[in-house]
Image: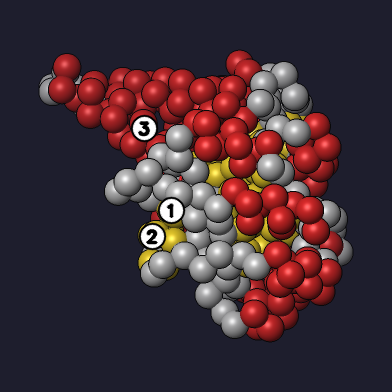
Amino acid sequence: MSFVTSKALLENAMKDGYAVGAFNVENMEMVMAVIRAAEEMNSPAILQTTPSTVKYAGLALYHANVKTAALAAKVPIVLHLDHGSSFELAIQAFHTGYTSIMIDGSKEEFEDNIALSKRVADACHTENIPVEAELGKVGGKEDDLVVKGPAYTDPDDAVRFVKETGIDSLAVAIGTAHGIYKGEPKLDMERLSEIRAVVDIPLVLHGASGVPDEAVKETIRRGISKVNFATELRIAYTGGMKEYLKEDPEVFDPKKYGKRSMEAVTNLVKEKMRLLGSENRA
Ligand code: 13P
């Protein structure tokens, strides 16, 4: 159907009490697999790339890939820069045609995070491209960045941050972490409700791989509108390939194991869309 921005998708999700999945993609097969899942579920989808992914193949290649597939798809598809690590990278993605941008100034001091996020929001809003920013610290290893010990988002800071930056969605730190969890993550649901009560833009949950389904659902009930999954997709993709290579160690045609990897990713993404309630919301 269309290559769209995340603005209306997230506002609709916020209004109707479900969440849109944001899925990290690394290559053409993952792009195809996520869009196939979205079509089969009649769901919107956000495809996103981190700075290290961008380093791997370049903004333009991901953009061409996702835009081409999106224009042929029957459901709305967004291309989002995940964890934009600098003003320059955010603006490059904006100029390349990404339809949603995250600037991650969460490692900066509060005032510096406000200034950076506002600068990116002001630039992207000239073309109505929405901007996500992060306040507090999501723990774990995302990309090249290792964050020690999460620092949870303070509701009062969130009010000021949203007002002064003019951003369109806010990533909150409530106890999730990027990557694999060692034990079951303990999420501060009360804090999430407190933030939801005082902030009027869509809220984003990072680090959802490995969070139990019931906990993900509870975050949506308490006001999360976008949920990010990366690690589980990588595991599914690589798992499909390993399984095929084990069955047929002599294989040399990448299409053969690529197909198995895509099936694994499509199945996983469909499960996540059901979990988030985005089925039939295209
Ligand atoms: P996971 O790798 O834990 O799914 O985190 C994804 C994420 O938040 C990307 O920004």
Residue at 61%, 41% (x, y): give it: 219
Query: Is the residue under label 1 in contact with that under label 3 (CB below 8 Å)?
Result: no
Distance between mark 3 and mark 1 Cα atoms: 18 Å
Q: Is residue 114 above or below residue 91?
A: below
**Sequence order check, earlier mark of 3 and 2:** 2
Q: Which residue is mark 3?
A: 237
Mark 1 C-beta closer than 8 Å to ligand 1? yes
* Residue type indicated by callout 1: His
Tell how many labels.
3
Label 2 Cα neighbours within 10 Å, binned few <14 / some 14-19 / many ≥20:
some
The image quarter containing residue 248 is: top left
Residue farthest toward the front in the current orientation of the protein: 190
* Residue type indicated by callout 2: Lys
Q: Which residue is mark 1?
A: 178
The quarter of the image holding the C terminus is top right
Kindly report which numbered mark, 3 or 2, lies closer to the viewer in this rendering.
Answer: 2
Secondary structure of the residue carrying tag 3 is helix
Q: Is residue 227 above or below residue 239?
A: below
Q: Is residue 94 left or right of residue 183?
A: right
Residue at 53%, 37% (x, y): give it: 215
**Sequence order check, earlier mark of 1 and 2:** 2
Mark 3 C-beta closer than 8 Å to ligand 1? no
Query: Is the residue under label 2 in contact with that under label 1 (CB below 8 Å)?
Result: yes
The quarter of the image holding the N terminus is top right
Towards the viewer: 270 or 155: 155
Mark number, residue 141:
2
Distance between mark 1 and mark 2 Cα atoms: 6 Å
Residue 19 appears in the rendering: yes
